[in-house]
Amino acid sequence: MIRTLCIGIDKYQSPINRLSCCVADARAIGSLFTDTHGDVVTSLLDGAATLSAMQTELDKLTSSAPEDLVIVSFSGHGTTDHRLVPVDADVADIEGSCLSLDDFAECLDKIPAKNLIVFLDCCFSVGFGGARVFAPTAVRSMTEDRTALQTLAHGHGRVVLTASGASEPALETAAFGHGLLSYHLIEGLQGAEDLASAGQIDLMSLLQWTVSKVVASARVLNEVQTPTIYGSFEGAPAIDPRSEEHTSELQSRQYL
């Protein structure tokens, strides 16, 4: 069984900048796994994506079986000190109202599934342009420590795909209606460009394919965005490609 938790937040409260495509990311990824092969999908969108709800749904994943594949996706803002920003974040208490990657890693450690994938379509560097980042004004660092991200992927069977490299934005574009990472990930999950072999998609091949596509799309936008893969799988897990009929958000897509 595939168990999926999809989180997408556009409607942040001022002074946190709103985003445009994060809910579409979560809905599209979730729809690929809805009502197929007995998959269990939970979505937290906009107002539902509070810190408490995120923690609760992560805790529910501890009931997964070792043979399950668990997927957690987050599309929204990140902070420069490596925290995921929920919809109810308090700018006066970033530490207490956001989910640190250390706490996130502790939640993941309790999930017994042998293979777990985390997609983070956000960034943790000082933001600019269309970047999915919320930077507290006190932070002025020009470099980024990736240790917290590496912690998320410690041990076997856990892989984390981040949207961008250190000090890079995680872009979203109206041309795709999604973040670049989510858009190409969804394409890959549908078996794009003969990615599927013998009726299945090798997960590591999917991630590497997604990275190359994001780099190319960012280049067209005159930006630099380099997704990064952390961790490794147990064995060589693969999944069936998902039908495009489950992804209505992509049916009228446009291309750069």
Image (cartoon, helix red, strand yellow):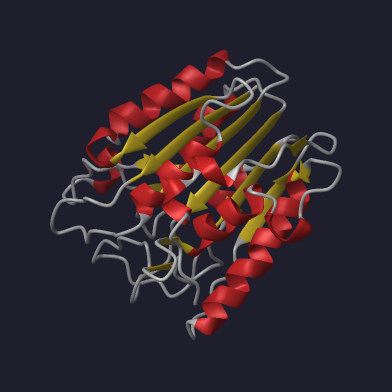
In the image, residue 79 above or below residue 131:
above
The x and y percentages for residue 165 are 56, 67
The x and y percentages for residue 89 are 23, 44
Snapshot quadrant of residue 210? bottom right
> 76 left or right of 117?
left
The x and y percentages for residue 80 are 38, 60
In the image, 131 versus 187, the foreground residue is: 187
Snapshot quadrant of residue 14? bottom left
Q: Residue at x 50, y 50 (%)?
A: 120
Residue 189 can be seen, yes or no: yes
Give the tally of numbered discs.
0
Q: Residue at x 46, y 45 (%)?
A: 28
Q: Residue at x 72, y 26 (%)?
A: 114
Snapshot quadrant of residue 157? top right
In the image, residue 19 above or below residue 107:
below
- Furthest toward the bottom, the residue is 222
Q: Residue at x 35, y 48 (%)?
A: 23
In the image, 120 versus 10, the foreground residue is: 10
Residue 154 can be seen, yes or no: no
In the image, residue 255 above or below residue 4:
below
The x and y percentages for residue 212 are 68, 68
Image quadrant in which the N terminus is located: top right
